[in-house]
Amino acid sequence: MVARIYGDCMKIEPRAVKIYKPEILVCPKCGQQLKYNYTVSNKVVQFTSGKAFRIKNMGYSCKDCNDDNVYFSQTATKLCFKGYTYSAKTVCMIDYYKNQGLGRDAICDILTQKGIFISDRNVDVLHKKIRSYIDAPYDELIKDYYNRLLNEYGKIRISIDLITIKEKCYVLFYDYYKGEILAIWIFDGLDDPKFTEILTPYFNNENIELIVSVRGYVSKFVPVLKEISPKNTKFISYLKF
């Protein structure tokens, strides 16, 4: 990866392009095959591995329904915060180290050691952003989301991710159809009693038909979700690359 700096701007050269289609290519309304419409996002993302990739999220639509709905990859959506070019794990790391009492210069040093190019100003911007999700009225947001899905689709689809930073687990709950983050919870590992206490009311819902997570290789995450979800819920797990 090569970084070219122009004043306050930095251009990151990606190692490769990663292209993502929706995980399910049939219309949730009529069941017909979805067709490519346009690219929802196309940006270079820096990861904590020190690598950068151009992430292309391909939007698909249903020609039979002929509505305004565009369906995209949940995996690609989870790779970074919407509107930003840093991986979701990078943003969670910023929050973790802020909570450990580190200043932005120290956090910049930690991220630089991982090959992530970021300014101290962006550390503050991203910390403010993730805190806006953590402190959001998630109960109200999720209930409104469920009601909207039931009215439009008759079923609920959930997109969720787990990011582990040392002893902490960040669980990100997404709007499946819009890609917006509705809630971020922080737990002391998956054995934290608060994990099932907080998530069970949202997952123990007979209208849930599908849960997508890109962290299928995490030993306990998906099994714990299965324990608190309806038995007929379909799970789809995809690795990010």
Image (spheres, rainbow, N blue to C red):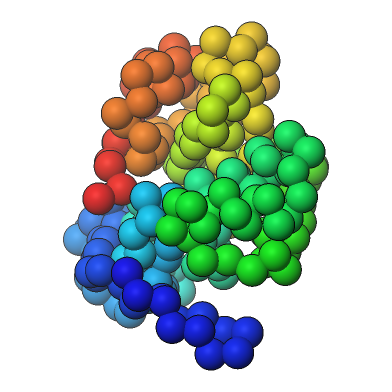
Q: Which residue is drawn at 45% across and 15% down?
A: 224
Q: Residue at x 43, y 83 (%)?
A: 4
Q: Position of residue 209 (x, y in %)?
A: 40, 33
The quarter of the picture where residue 25 lies is bottom left
From the viewer's perspective, is residue 23 above or below residue 4?
Answer: above
From the viewer's perspective, is residue 34 above or below residue 156?
Answer: below
From the viewer's perspective, is residue 57 above or below residue 81?
Answer: below
Taking 206 as reference, is 196 left or right? Answer: right
Instruction: Using the rendered image of the protein, determine whether residue 74 is visible from the camera's viewpoint.
Output: no
Taking 7 as reference, is 86 left or right? Answer: left
Q: Position of residue 38 (x, y in %)?
A: 33, 79
Q: For the N terminus, which image quadrant?
A: bottom left
Taking 40 as reference, is 120 left or right? Answer: right
Q: Which residue is drawn at 68% across and 50% down?
A: 106
The quarter of the picture where residue 234 lies is top left
Q: Which residue is drawn at 64% across and 9% down?
A: 193
Q: Position of residue 227 (x, y in %)?
A: 44, 12
Instruction: Using the rendered image of the protein, determine whether residue 241 is visible from the camera's viewpoint.
Output: yes
Closest to the observer, 185 or 226: 185
Closest to the observer, 155 or 13: 13
